[in-house]
Amino acid sequence: MTGLRYSICLLVAGAWIAPLAAQDSAGSTHQAPASSARASKEKVTGIGGFFFRAKDPKALSQWYLTHLGVSITPTSYEESPWQQEAGPTVFAPFPQDTDYFGSPEQQWVINFRVRDLNRMVEQLKTARIAVKLDPKEYPNGRFARIRDLEGNPIELWEPRTPGAGH
């Protein structure tokens, strides 16, 4: 797991410092395209939704609202959906045989940014939610793991601000 965190740190830090080089299946290294080449192409601006199956969607939505503050999906266009704060987002497909997600059947892990990981951990523990706090501090911040009401893995991330001392 430490090696995996390291690769994520490089990806996040790479966005702050310099474009990353990528390796194709043949092992050849390719640099990310120059920003001027990217300026002419349309790109997505963020994640507009995260949709997944649930045994009890209503109960699971309530769990996310109660414990993580993620608003329940609106039932009309007059209601506002959950608004996330701007910040770094890592979009990373993993190898099929990774153990990072827990069980082999698990197809995803969602990572939520938090401002104060210690406070969030205490809040979750008070609600009797098992929290696994990673004791290591990484160049891009601190992490903890929980599982939602249906056992789905959730990673909590307190990003480290570039230049800030922790």
Image (cartoon, grey):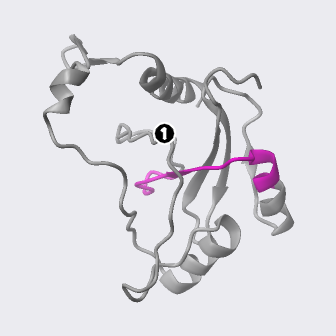
Q: Which residue is pictured at 74% across the width and 46% down the height?
A: 117
- 37 lies above or below 115: above
| Residue identified by numbered label 1 | 88
Instruction: Tell whether position 113 is magenta.
Output: yes
Quarter holding the N terminus?
Answer: top right
View extreme (left): residue: 40
Q: Which residue is pictured at 25% across the width and 23% down the height?
A: 35
Compared across the picture, whether 8 is left or right of 22 comes to right
Q: Which residue is pictured at 72% across the width and 37% down the height?
A: 134
Where residue 139 appears, as percent x and y from the top left, is 63, 23
Residue in the foreground of this view, choosing between 75 and 148: 75
How many numbered circles does the render carry? 1
Q: Which residues are magenta?
A: 103-121
Q: Is residue 56 visible?
A: no
Where residue 81 appears, as percent x and y from the top left, is 46, 73
- 140 lies above or below 89: above
- 22 lies above or below 88: above
Label 1's element?
A: loop
The type of residue carrying mark 1 is Pro
Q: Which residue is pictured at 81% across the width and 47% down the height?
A: 118
Q: Quadrant of residue 92?
A: top left
Residue in the foreground of this view, choosing between 16 and 97: 16
Compared across the picture, whether 35 is left or right of 137 comes to left
Where residue 126 appears, as percent x and y from the top left, is 86, 65
